[in-house]
Image (spheres, grey):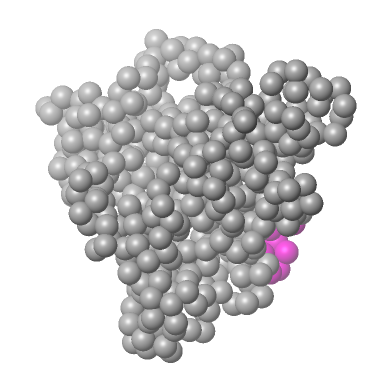
Amino acid sequence: MYTYSTYVHLDLWKERAVLGGLQRRLAERERAGAPIRVGLVGAGQMGLGLAAVLGRIPGMRLVAVADLVVGRAAAALRQNGAERAKIAEARTGVEARAASARGRLVATVAPEAVTELPVDVVVDATGVPLQAALTASWAMEARRHVILLTVEADVTVGHLLAKRAAEAGVVYTGATGDEPAATKELVEFAEFLGFEVVCAGKGKNNPLDRRANAQSLAAEARTSGVNPRLLAEFVDGTKSMVEMACLANATGLLPDVRGMHGAKATPAELAHVFIPEADGGILRRRGVVDFAMGAAPGVFVVVHTDHPVIHEELRYLKLGAGPYFALFRPFHLTSIETPVSIARAALEGEASICPLPTPVAEVITVAKRRLQSGERLGLAGEDTVYGLIEEAAVACRENLLPLGLAARAEVLRDLEADQPIRWDDVEVDDTPLLTMRREQDSLVGAGLLAPIRNS
């Protein structure tokens, strides 16, 4: 019988001095009248949450918001604490720049305008891979730091974006509080202390149904007050695949099998399930990413030590029988934590999570139902496709289509349900995202993105 004390219960492992140091520096900027100026693209649920918390942090100012609906952009600024009279609505970059020059806060429908304004950090919270990649590119050209809440863009062209950011001398990063960054913090914590990381992952807080789509979950979404497509993206497993691919590409950890195991495990069971088969677990190898059904909404790392003194100390601390131990963080605050990444980028020039130079994981596209020639693929969470994580080398060798490029692609031949989709099964729309992916692939193929060690 395992109890609460048999796993490590971590609310925040960061040293208080680190966050305290950021707070002091932000307070100094507030007193000097030089707060970090933040531009936000996307005023949906994530963007609105970020806008609200930014309004409560001295030393930061939300100065511009872009959204497809200008009223939503203005509403985000009001949630940040702005008076209506201080907000100017702008349809173009020219209007936005003129309003900013007059000292107004800018609400606009032109995302590129945000990157042109006098901001220090640009945050993308659109959830749309193409838009996120474009916003990141514009921001880097303008020498702005970039915080990407749209993980789908990162797993599609993140390595190229990281390279461009380094060349521009700015920070490109995912957001603290999103599951990939929250898990990476635990990985870094464990590795700093000399533990071997056996498995790192997240808890999934809803049942796994590969056939779920926006239509089938419409009633549940209305009851919960969420977007039905986004809900379906979580239920069909795609979101977990994207998040763990992001983590893999930032750490070098690999998926153990295509789609990961997704085994059932409570926090107290993690160190007995996500361990090698030879020791009674489910893993074929060590150093992997995965997800657990039953450990939500937390993130975890299963570690190993063979040092007898450390082993005995952990047993004395009631962390389990060993030699495997679980570190568990029982929450992640998504966009509410993003200001930490903003501060680290602007004040310290550091990323919370950023891809290593060469990809190790890919999210491939899989048919959700039988698809006929001539059909168009939809977005994740709709009724045509879902995503599965796979090793990047395998995806390349098998010519598998990255999920981030699937939207609007035309099916060229009939495909069966659960069939992985290859590049030559579809005609992909010629978009700037496709151009960026081709550039990233050419850099990897030419060895111009430095190789990394295989963990």
| Residue at 34% across, 57% down | 232
Q: Position of residue 40 (x, y in %)?
A: 33, 40
Give coordinates of residue 182: x percent, y percent: 54, 36
Q: Which residue is drawn at 48% across and 15% down?
A: 23
Horizontally, residue 13 falls left or right of residue 303, namely left
Which secondary structure type mostly characterizes the magenta part of the structure? loop
Q: Where is residue 139 in the image (x, y as percent from the top left)?
A: 43, 46
Identity of the residue drawn at 42% across and 88% down = 414
Residue that sits furthest to the left in the current view = 85
Residue situated furthest right in the rendering: 308
| Rendered position, 114 above or below 441 | above
Which region is colored magenta? 443-452
| Residue 450 within the segment the image draws in magenta | yes
Does 3 sit above or below residue 392?
A: above
Q: In this view, does 210 lie to the left or right of 107?
A: right
Compared across the picture, whether 343 is left or right of 336 comes to right
Q: Which residue is drawn at 87% across and 27% down?
A: 308
Quadrant in which the N terminus is drawn: top right
Camera-side residue of 73 and 255: 255
- Residue closest to the far front: 1
Asked if residue 113 shows in the view, the reply is no
The image shows residue 452, relative to residue 353, as above or below, that is below
Q: Nearer the viewer, residue 422 or 282?
A: 282
Q: In this view, does 121 lie above or below 229?
A: above
Q: Is residue 371 magenta?
A: no
Residue 291 visible from this viewpoint:
yes
